[in-house]
Image (cartoon, rainbow, N blue to C red):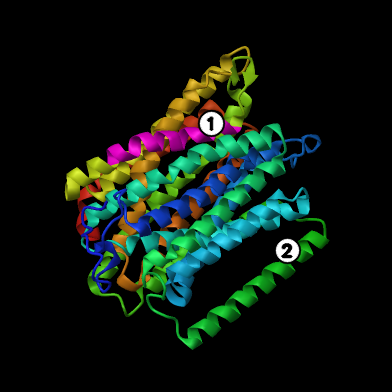
């Protein structure tokens, strides 16, 4: 990642990416972003590791007492809301406050959300999830934009490798979080687990503010500041939207007819409408050149592929977690392993495989195109669902109804390969395709594909009509994902030619 970084500390006018690196071989700006994302990911992975388990736990055990399909819908709703929020979050960074402050404000909202979840009252739970979703939508696209700003525009191979290394680094926290938060949540108290996640986000904010001096002017100002008229128009639009939602759902709740599916329906509508409007407005923007319009139009195919990938991958935290809880033999040395611990498998395997793929992408350069990398990620994810289909079939035929945990371990290994070959490359390709003054918004659009995928994946179990995932459920999703991976390989040449990355 640092191959293109030259050393020179004497001339402060030189770009930050060209200054002298500290003894550990990483520039100080990277260390700061790395440490911040480590703690933010700790809070994220810790909370999501116990979210579905807490939601499905009985009220007598301190949970919400939800059914499996409603809990997976809640998980999908949260993920989709966080991804939807990344579009206005990217706009705020690009046009209003700059990526540095957008990351800071997002971290504060996330911390407040986790504190709400730590309060042992159901009334604080859903507002807490909303705050975390809004904060994540503000932080994530601007964190990627800030990281991308330290690389030269033409250094595509270096940027791909840099994103992969960064993606690998934060998995250290993702590995530890389910173990720490899961242990506290499942064996002591659910809200203690959520409290640990809040402490992690607080540590990340402290690290970010302390290390901000290494950024110089990078990210301090918006790429293209919004005019006063644009700010007023967006403000009034936001006020109107909040008023309509407050009145609508307030009336729904007062009549006693409110259901989580009503919110899911709105988020589902937004996941389709927002990217449609975004692409339409971006393609009509006079600031775009003709080649940029071609790249953005072609990027729509990558967006759809990303939505399918996230629809499958995000089920690792919901449907796979339910399978660990209900159909996996978790007895070991006379103890029962918490189901949340299995969520550490993906980051563990990411840590193992990410350096390998980062080296491969760096060595291959432009010979391995983005479509092929996407295809590899999709095929690996499809194979993970194929493994789960076999595991579910064996569990259905076993007297105990449970199977060896090695099935889940293998499936999570394949999911990890899918993640490390798809997600960081997707972010890197998005920043490369994006027009110069729309980087954060385009990264937000990439995460909006996650919103669409989260909505689809969150509703998949309920739509199947099964209370728990069946062999047929896993097999059907495996076949769809494998077919999409094959299509990406077949279309690699025209996609590469039109994308230019």
Residue at left 45%, top 67%? 100
Q: Position of residue 46 (x, y in %)?
A: 58, 43
Q: Residues within 10 Å of mark 1 (few under 14, many from 20)?
A: many
Task: Work out whether 395 lies above or below 497.
Answer: above
Q: Which mark is residue 76?
A: none
Q: Position of residue 209 (x, y in %)?
A: 49, 63
Q: Is residue 465 visible?
A: no
Instruction: Give 401 or 226, whichever is nearer the viewer.
Output: 226
Instruction: Give 465 or 405, whichever is nearer the viewer.
Output: 405
Spatial CA distance of label 2 from label 1 is 36 Å
Q: Is residue 100 left or right of residue 136?
A: left
Instruction: Give 382 or 96, whichever is nearer the viewer.
Output: 96
| Residue interval drawn in magenta | 340-357
Q: Which mark is residue 249?
A: 2
Residue at left 53%, top 31%? 342
Location of residue 45 by image quarter: top right
304 part of magenta stretch = no
Q: Nearer the viewer, mark 2 or mark 1?
A: 1
The secondary element bearing badge 1 is classed as: helix
The secondary element bearing badge 2 is classed as: helix
Task: Work out whether 209 lies above or below 395.
Answer: below
Instruction: From the image, give the main secondary structure of the stretch colored magenta.
Output: helix
Q: Position of residue 38 (x, y in %)?
A: 47, 49
Task: Work out whether 24 lies above or below 401.
Answer: below
344 part of magenta stretch = yes
**Which residue is disc 1 drawn over?**
342
Earlier residue among tags 2 and 1: 2
Residue at left 47%, top 58%? 140
Q: Position of residue 87 (x, y in %)?
A: 48, 65
Q: Is residue 161 left or right of residue 450?
A: left
Q: Is residue 224 visible?
A: yes
């Amino acid at each position: 990642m640092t191959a293109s970084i030259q050393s020179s500390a004497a001339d402060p006018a030189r770009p930050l990416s060209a200054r002298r690196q500290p003894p550990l071989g990483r520039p100080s700006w990277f260390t700061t972003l790395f440490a911040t994302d480590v703690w933010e990911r700790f809070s994220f992975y810790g909370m999501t590791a116990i979210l579905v388990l807490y939601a499905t736990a009985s009220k007598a055990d301190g949970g919400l007492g939800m059914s499996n399909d409603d809990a997976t819908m809640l998980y999908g709703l949260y993920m989709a809301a966080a991804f939807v929020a990344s579009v206005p979050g990217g706009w705020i960074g690009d046009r209003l406050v700059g990526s540095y402050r957008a990351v800071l404000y997002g971290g504060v909202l996330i911390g407040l959300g986790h504190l709400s979840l730590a309060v042992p009252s159901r009334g604080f739970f859903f507002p807490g999830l909303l705050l975390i979703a809004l904060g994540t939508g503000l932080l994530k696209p601007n964190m990627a934009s800030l990281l991308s700003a330290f690389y030269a525009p033409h250094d595509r191979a270096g940027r791909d490798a840099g994103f992969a290394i960064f993606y690998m680094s934060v998995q250290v926290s993702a590995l530890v979080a389910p173990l720490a938060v899961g242990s506290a949540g499942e064996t002591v108290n659910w809200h203690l687990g959520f409290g640990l996640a809040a402490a992690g986000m607080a540590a990340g904010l402290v690290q970010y503010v302390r290390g901000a001096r290494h950024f110089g002017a990078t990210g301090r100002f918006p790429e293209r500041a919004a005019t006063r008229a644009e700010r007023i128009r967006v403000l009034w639009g936001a006020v109107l939207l909040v008023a309509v939602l407050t009145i609508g759902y307030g009336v729904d709740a007062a009549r006693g007819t409110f259901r989580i599916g009503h919110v899911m329906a709105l988020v589902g509508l937004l996941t389709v409408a927002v990217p449609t409007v975004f692409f339409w407005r971006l393609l009509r923007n006079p600031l775009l050149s003709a080649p940029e319009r071609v790249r953005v139009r072609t990027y729509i195919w990558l967006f759809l592929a990303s939505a399918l990938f996230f629809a499958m991958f995000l089920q690792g935290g919901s449907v796979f977690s339910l399978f660990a809880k209900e159909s996996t033999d978790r007895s070991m040395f006379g103890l029962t392993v918490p189901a949340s611990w299995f969520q550490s498998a993906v980051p563990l395997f990411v840590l193992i495989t990410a350096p390998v793929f980062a080296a491969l992408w760096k060595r291959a350069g432009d010979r391995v195109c983005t479509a092929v990398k996407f295809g590899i990620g999709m095929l690996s994810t499809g194979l993970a669902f194929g493994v789960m289909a076999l595991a579910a079939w064996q569990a259905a035929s076993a007297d105990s109804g449970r199977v060896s945990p090695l099935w889940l371990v293998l499936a999570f290994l394949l999911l990890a390969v899918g993640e490390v070959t798809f997600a960081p490359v997707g972010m890197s390709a998005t920043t490369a395709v994006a027009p110069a003054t729309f980087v954060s918004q385009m990264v937000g659009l990439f995460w909006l594909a996650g919103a669409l995928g989260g909505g689809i994946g969150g509703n998949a179990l309920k739509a199947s009509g099964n209370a728990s995932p069946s062999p047929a459920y896993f097999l059907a999703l495996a076949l769809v994902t494998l077919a999409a991976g094959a299509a990406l390989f077949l279309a690699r040449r025209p996609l590469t030619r039109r994308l230019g990355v």
